[in-house]
Amino acid sequence: MPANLGGTLTPAQDLTLTRIGYGAMQLAGPNVFGPPKDRDRAVAVLRAAVEAGITHIDTADFYGPAVVNELIKEALHPYRADLRIVTKVGARRGPDGSWRQILDPADLKAQVHDNLAHLGVDTLDVVNLRLGSHDTPTEDSLAEQFGALAELRQQGLIRHLGLSAVSARQLAEAQAIAPVVTVQNLYNLAHRQDDDLLDLCAAQNIAFVPYFPLGGFTPLQSETLTKVAARLDASPQQVALAWLLQRSPAIALIPGTSSVTHLHENIASAELTLPADATEELNGIGGR
């Protein structure tokens, strides 16, 4: 293993995740729609992630749609015993590639079965209910939707449940129905509106998984970040990931890439120690 991957998190007795995982979203075509330009390269990245010791792969059947899950199956099936594939439901793609929020309980169950089929498994390790997005946050009740997934958990089709794009109130509502092992919200060096939620998850041994840890479709741009990275002889991306790992022991990262080289650069961020003065400078970048 080329790095320690930041250690591991164990939010449930039978669920251990490397703190640096791999987000598979970028393996699909442009706008996360259609097949990749280079299928062999996509397969190689997935295999390199597992060979590096990563046990946490994040995906969704609406990536492609189905394309990314089928790539994961092609590259990694039969799956290593310690590999944990985390998927999410709550959306589908239109024929034009549009993103459509779909939260009907019956359709959520159908989405779970789609993930099962395309990943080639009988049980999904973790399913996150994607309730909203950073663009369209919601405080709606999730009881009906989360309850539908809890039924599938009782049936043995899902081992663990998580949430995505939710508030502290919604987390509490879900926990009254079934245990929650992961929360996946927008969070990075420049977007820290969920500081309090992150701390709450840490206190409750819930893995907090920032999506867009490097800014997503609009990569992080900061003169301060660039200067700190140069001083530490690291890339800005590595510094941004190291800051997240240092921010809280509850954080697990899923940076995405379609490049083996970038994958190993992301992994190397676990070896980067940020001195106190650098951390103080970086803390000044974002806000609530």
Image (cartoon, rainbow, N blue to C red):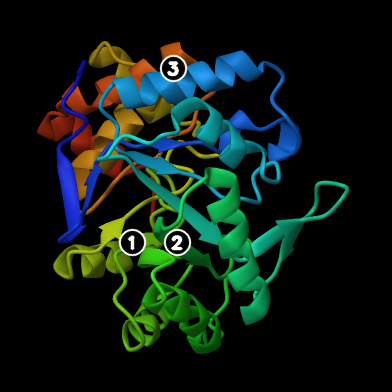
Q: Give the alpha-carbon distance from disc 2 to disc 3, as whole Å.
A: 27 Å
Which quadrant of the structure image shows residue 81? top left
Name above or below for residue 28 compared with residue 163: above
In 3D space, how far apart are the residues under numbered discs 2 and 1 (Cα atoms)?
Answer: 9 Å
Which kind of residue does numbered mark 2 sit on?
Val
How many residues crowd mark 2 within 10 Å: few (<14), some (14–19), many (20+)? many
Q: Nearer the viewer, residue 153 or 19?
A: 153
For disc 3, the marked residue is: 262
Please name the residue shown 28% across and 42% down the image.
244
The residue at the far left in this view is 276
Q: In the image, is 273 to the left or to the right of 57?
A: left
For disc 3, the neighbor class at 10 Å (few under 14, some 14 to 19, many from 20) is some
Residue under numbered circle 1: 182
Q: In this orientation, which residue lies closer to the viewer: 183 or 35?
A: 35
Disc 3 residue type? Answer: His
Badge 1 amino acid? Thr
Q: Nearer the viewer, residue 232 or 210?
A: 210
- Tag 1 or tag 2, which sits nearer the N-term? 2
Q: Secondary structure at mark 2?
A: strand
Q: Distance between the Cα atoms at labels 1 and 3?
A: 25 Å
Considering only order in the chain, which callout, 3 or 2, is on the residue closer to the N terminus?
2
Q: Percent from the top left, x then y, of residue 117?
A: 59, 51
The reply to whether discs 2 and 1 touch (Cβ–Cβ < 8 Å) is: no
Q: Say the numbered circle drawn on residue 127.
A: 2
Residue 249: x and y in percent read 16, 50
Q: For the residue labelled by badge 3, is the local secondary structure a helix, a strand or a loop? A: helix
Identity of the residue drawn at 31% across and 40% down: 83
Task: Where is residue 66? Give x, y as percent.
Answer: 67, 44
